[in-house]
Image: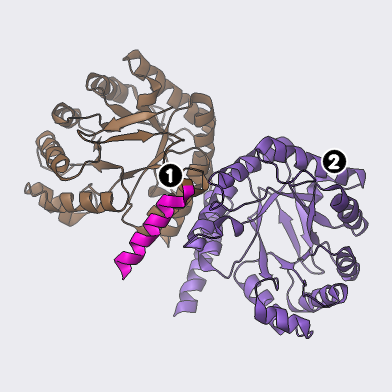
Chain colours: A brown, B purple
Amino acid sequence: METHLSSKTKQIIISPDHPFVIIGERINPTRRKALMESLARGDFSIALDDARKQVATGAHVLDVNAGVPGADEPKLLEGLARALTQEVDAPLCFDSANPAALEAALAAYEGKALINSTTGEEKMMNTVLPLTAKYHAAVIGVVTDDSGVPATPEARLAVARKIVQRAADYGMSPEDVVIDCLALTVSADSLAGRVTLDSLQLIRQELGVNLSLGASNVSFGLPDRVAINAAYLALGIARGMTAAITDPTIPELATTIRACDLLMGRDEYAMRWIKAYRAARKAKA
Amino acid sequence: METHLSSKTKQIIISPDHPFVIIGERINPTRRKALMESLARGDFSIALDDARKQVATGAHVLDVNAGVPGADEPKLLEGLARALTQEVDAPLCFDSANPAALEAALAAYEGKALINSTTGEEKMMNTVLPLTAKYHAAVIGVVTDDSGVPATPEARLAVARKIVQRAADYGMSPEDVVIDCLALTVSADSLAGRVTLDSLQLIRQELGVNLSLGASNVSFGLPDRVAINAAYLALGIARGMTAAITDPTIPELATTIRACDLLMGRDEYAMRWIKAYRAARKAKA
């Protein structure tokens, strides 16, 4: 199954037969004070710098969050989207809980965006899915619903199925729903990682949809988070994950993803591996 | 399914419900000139040092290879096994293509050893399996046979099944056969990694046996081999691999394995992760 995303000038395909898709997570002011302050004064320079750096290190798509307290989010997200489109050719992923902001950005966007996100909650689906359908976008569906976070892979599959079916009611095909199996922190629950990995495998097998994870939360509260996040990306990829919201400017993460593409048979003659190695060596020298 | 190995003083269990088992690969004179020369003069100091370092960095079992050209391998392997048993409590894995050497080491060994290895070749099975059964050892069964290396996961499953069944003919239970799905180099064949990963999953699902890999060959001929090998360990673990012959003295590999245990729900309260992190920080300071 192929999820197509596009900017005005570039198409990206999420699929098990294509290189793993990195959705760069850095353009998000939460916990980033300097970015937050710059966005608050309508200054996009830090965001544009993040965009360039993420694309240079391997991001295929850029997550864009303009959640600045007190700001006019629709205006800010739309403006940021326009500025980013001038700067890089990567398709965008609009990350907002504000429907008006999503609509403003989608209406202005020339391409097929990804929306981050809906859950299986009724209110969310009734708001986000019609918007997704109206603008012919794709959407991330997070496997939680009005009953909370399902504890088992089977229950997460049920929520994923509900989101895919509801999307179909709005005329969307399953290709345009990317399921997020929800990575909770292993420091709070030792089995959290495993349940998510088992969910990836089950949902991939039963629904065939593309799968993404916000893969940085799993290590929250633990030391050496990068090593945990890198291992988690590889484990997830082995279980059928085809995209992740992560930070490619962290070399260990980008390298792990490239190694996984190589080992999963998605890098013929190891060309991308060797090219990235040479580029890194040149950058160091 | 649990594979039990033991030295005189320590038991190790290979199983999906236990921490991933690291079989330390360093005591092998192939391509290690100083070790080769020391073993040739009956000097075990380098080997014993390798043993200590591997156990200190996380090896649960030690692979022992005494293949020194011109040496009396049975005598050397037996002597080395005795010396190692004095030095460390990790169970041993006897690595030899010489049946007399295997028998000498097994006869002297007080515990339940692992044998590396048989294949599905008739001559090999007829030699190695009776020895394994006679000494109540366990054996690694590599999925290649008289027809060569099978190209597909299904064909590798067939060889694995043959080895397990032949072992049963000698009175061995499937617990005592650890299947090696054969990691070939991705630089020679882009699909080599993927076929092995798919084989792990299929064989685990169909036979339920424990699975090991010699996980260092996959990166042969490529730059930044450690990053490839680390990613491969994680991918394999996600697919059901429960042990690997690898080098835990390479920090990235040991760290990746510990992260995978954490993320697969095999490290309650992240205690081993945090302990290893503290030890590493202390060692640095």
Residue at point 26%, 32% (across, down): A6
Give the percent coordinates (x, y) of residue A12.
32, 35
Is residue A284 rendered magenta in the image? yes
Task: Assign the N terminus of chain A to one quadrant of the image.
Answer: top left
- Nearer the observer, disc 2 or disc 1? 2
Would residue A145 appear left or right of A151 to someone viewing this image? left
- Mark sitting on residue A50: none
Would residue B185 appear left or right of A16 to someone viewing this image? right
Task: Assign the C terminus of chain A to one quadrant of the image.
Answer: bottom left
The residue closer to the viewer here, B11 or B234, is: B234
| Residue for badge 1 | A184
Q: In whole angstroms, how far apart are the C-alphas of marks 2 and 1? A: 42 Å
Q: In the image, what residue type sits under mark 2? A: Gln
The chain containing the residue under callout 2 comes to: B
The residue closer to the viewer here, A104 or A81, is: A81
Residue at point 40%, 38% (across, down): A212
Q: Which residues are magenta?
A: A269-285
Indicate the quadrant where residue A109 lies: top left
Q: In the image, what residue type sits under mark 1? A: Leu
Which secondary structure type mostly characterizes the magenta part of the structure?
Answer: helix
| Residue for badge 2 | B165
| Label 1: element kind | loop
Give the percent coordinates (x, y) of residue B240.
63, 45
Give the percent coordinates (x, y) of residue B27.
70, 72
The residue closer to the viewer here, B76 or B139, is: B76
Indicate the quadrant where residue B111 lies: bottom right
